[in-house]
Each structure stands twice: as C-alpha cells, then as structure tokens.
Image (spheres, rainbow, N blue to C red):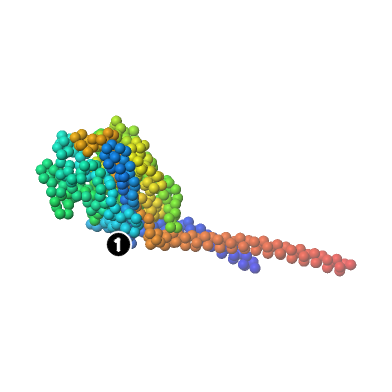
Amino acid sequence: MSNWILVGPIVGIVLLASGLILGYLVFPPIVTKTIVESVQIVKDSDQYGRWKEVPQPLDFKVYIFNVTNPLEVQQGGTPRVEEIGPYVYLQYRRKYNIRFSRDNEQVSYYQQQTFKFDAERSHPYREDDPIVVLNMHMNSIIQTIEHDSPFILSMLNGELKNIFGPDATSMFMTTTPKKFLFDGVEFCKDAVGVAQLVCMTVEDRKSQSITKSDDGRGLKFSMFSHKNVTHDGLYEINTGIRRLEKLMKIERWNEQKTLKTWKADKFGAPSVCQYINGTDGSAVAPFREKNDNFYIYSSDICRSVQLFYQRETEYKGIPGYRYETRENFLTDIGPCYGNECFCIDKISGALKEDNGCLYSGAIDLTDCLDAPIVATLPHFYGGHPTYEKMIDGINPNPEKHQIFLEVEPRTGSPLRGGKKAQFNMFLKKIDYITMTSNFKTPRLFPVLWVDEGIELNDEMAGLIKNDLINTLLILDIVQWTLVGVGAALIVGMLIWFFLAKKRMSKTSSTEIITDASTSKSEVN
C-alpha cells in the first residue's frame, strides 16, 4: 500500500505538470506557427490558392430609390422615393498578373471582378422591372458643363433632346435595373451638329461609367459596367512574410502610395486624405486584440475607412470580433477635424458650408468618379438632417445601414461583413436649363445604395472550424484531461492516504485497548 500511496501522487504530479506545460508552453507556439503559415501569402500554398481566386462569391446587393412622383418633382414638389431591392448579384473575384518581389515581402496583381445576377435570391425583383430614377448621365453632363464651361449652357438647353432622345423633357427616366446597372442606357444616338460636339467631348473624357454603344452609333451610361469582367487597378500588398502585422496591407495602388483624388496640404505634401491605409477587406492581420482597429481601402470612393472594435460575436459556431465604422465616418470632415482636403468644392450650387465642405455626412466624389456624384451612408444615415427632410421615404437604420466586418480573431479571416455606400446627385436649378427652372432649392437626391459583402457559407465556415476551432478544442481537451486526471490522482491519493492513516490509527487504538484488557484479566 505504501508504494501505491507514493506512486499515485507522483503520477498525478507528472500528468498535471505535463498538461500545464503542453497547454502553456508547447501547444501555443505550435498553434501560432500553424496559423502564421496558413495566412501568409506564399506561392503554391493552400492559402495562395484561396487568395488567388476567392472560393466563395461575394454578395453585391443593390437597392434602388424608385421615384413615385416624378411629374410632381419636376414641377417643384417634394420628391417621394420607394426603396426597391435587393437586386442580388454574385461577385466572383480572381487575381491575375501576379508578381512577387525578390524578397517575397510584396506581391502585385490585378483583380478581375465578374457579376452574375442571382434571380432566386433577388425574388420577387427582376432585372426587367420598370424603374423611375434620376437621369444621372444627363444631370452629370449638365452639371459638369455648368462647372467647367457655363457660357455654353444656353446652347446646350436647345440640344438636350438631340443628345438624350425625344423623352428628355424631365430630369427623370424610366428604365430597368438591367440597363441602369450594367447593360447601359443609350444616348447620343446619331448626334449631329452641336449635339455631336457635346457627345464627342463626353466620350473624350473617358468617364468609367460611359462607353461606346454596341452598334457604335452613340454612347451608353451604366452605373457598374466598368466593374464587370475588369479590374479596379493594380494592387501591391504585403505578404506578411517578414512583418505579420502588415499582412494584406496595401503598399501601393496603381503604383502610387498616395491618391491624387484629394487635395495636398498647403505645402504641397501628401495630406491625410491622400494616404492609402489598410487592406482591401478580404482579410486583416491575424491575432486581433479587442482594442485593435483597422482600415479598409475602397476604390469605389477613393479613400480608406476605419473600423473600430464593438463586441464579441459568433457566426456558425465560430467566435468572432465585430468591427464597425463610427457615426462620424462622413460627418467629421472639415478644417476643425484636420481633413478639409476632402472638401474639393467641385459641384456648383451644392448644399455646403462657408468653408466649401458639403453638409456633414456626405463626400464629393467628382474627382474620384469623374462625375458630380456624392457618397453617403444608406438613407443618409448619420448625415445632416437637411438631407433626410428634403426627400420623403428615407428611413435610416443603424442595424441595416452600418458598415461592419466580423472576423475570426486568431486568423483575421472575415466571417461576414458589409461595405455599404449610397450614391447621390444634387438636383438643383441650373441657369439656362429650362427643365430645372422649378427646382428652387438644391436637394441631395438618392439614386441607389450598395451592400457589398460576404457571409461565409457552410463549406468555408467548416474549413475554419476543422482547421482551427476543432484543433484548438482537441488541444484544450488534451491539456485539461491531463490536468484533471493528474489533479484527481493527487487528490484521490491524498484522501486515500488520510483515510488509510485514520484506519491504522483506529486499529492501533483498538489493539492497545485489547492488550490492556488482557493484561488486567491476567492480573486478576
């Protein structure tokens, strides 16, 4: 028995120590090494294959503001809009022309995006639904001429039907999502004379949303055809080989470290608006802490967006951290915030402060998109109350309209997220343009908003669970089983020891009493 009393605690101590050593000294570096190798961009690795061609399409959801009273608006009434959608498109991404630097610390590439309409998830909405929307290309051309060459506006007024067709008597048009978003709305058809000169000037500007019509006899406008089966520029990112905290960070975009879209500082040096910060949102650096914040760069709005930690979350059994933009994302713009470089003041007669900045919650994308388009959050969420008051049918909702990203904190892998932006134009009176004569007050008019994001499907979520979560669970089980069994053996043997000692004491006492009784009997 004495041997067992000694062996039990020794075995328990060994098991307990093994569990603690494995759990705190052996397993963590193994897990860290495995995660590091699984997220770094190394040619011919499994991660490289997933990075090169995203294995799951992203969701590209479009919500259109259908104008229900265009005739009334044309007469100067308050616009009334109805949000219709989502029109859901699957966005496939594939990288090509991939080149690694000599030290493998950077990799450059183009990323082709291909869109495919998802009729099932869009139901009951269809691509051929009739919609009434702001005539963006006409409004854009008129406002551009107003800003650049106002002296020809009176001449342009008499040519609008020759440029935009016989129905160009209103600032609104009836079309379909298919044409408006991707296929294109035709104009400048067989234009001659002054109309032809205007159309040639428009074509020469090479705006990304305006292309040659299929038959070559005119032009066509669409919101997103420039994004389909093409790329959004040359990226150079960090592979994370040397500095893991820089994994996926954009080093250059179109061979530039800064953006020419925004103004430099007063000394001509790059301003805070011009720097390209963060990743493209497809992943972030691993080993996130709760107080970590990060940037995502969006070429759609030509700027970086900062996301802040909000709370712990869970998606399909995978623990995650949720990050969101703050309400001041588009509101804190101006000299008092040190970022007046976003105030480019390119839209004549817009709603703006004395310093040239638009009312809070909006950013002028004229130089970014080569058109007088203004970006806000959906339904003017967080923006100046004037915007919402001027349009009936606007209903901002933080749960639906907030930009967010949920990531698995150890790997930095996105679990779900949504990059959201609303595209608007000012509807206002323009001198010499007859059809705008009733627009007494400028209004920021919503056209559509986009939710571009992802929710990992079961296959991709299963990959994270099998490769990481389940592995960590198994290691935890091994660690705490050893600790538990070791502790149980130690406690069990100690209890056994004390019980055995107690029994021995009782036995000894009984023997003494018995001996004493026997001795007494003998004396008698």
Q: Which residue does the numbered mark 1 point to in the structure image? A: 44
Q: Is residue 382 above or below residue 23?
A: above
**Nearer the observer, 335 or 98:** 335
**Nearer the observer, 417 or 14:** 417
Residue at horizontal 26 percent and vertical 51 percent from the top: 176
Residue at horizontal 59 percent and vertical 66 percent from the top: 7
Q: Percent from the top left, x then y, of residue 517?
A: 83, 66
Residue found farthest to the right: 524
Quadrant of the drawing holding the C terminus: bottom right
Answer yes or no: is residue 370 visible: no
Relative to 202, 277 lies left or right: right
Q: Percent from the top left, x then y, of residue 168?
A: 20, 43
Quadrant of the drawing holding the N terminus: bottom right
Disc 1 residue type? Answer: Asp
Number of marks in the rendered image: 1
Q: Percent from the top left, x then y, of residue 241?
A: 32, 54
Q: Percent from the top left, x then y, of residue 62?
A: 31, 50
Residue at horizontal 15 percent and vertical 34 percent from the top: 151
Residue 49 falls in image quadrant: bottom left
Answer yes or no: is residue 337 visible: yes
Residue at horizontal 64 percent and vertical 61 percent from the top: 495
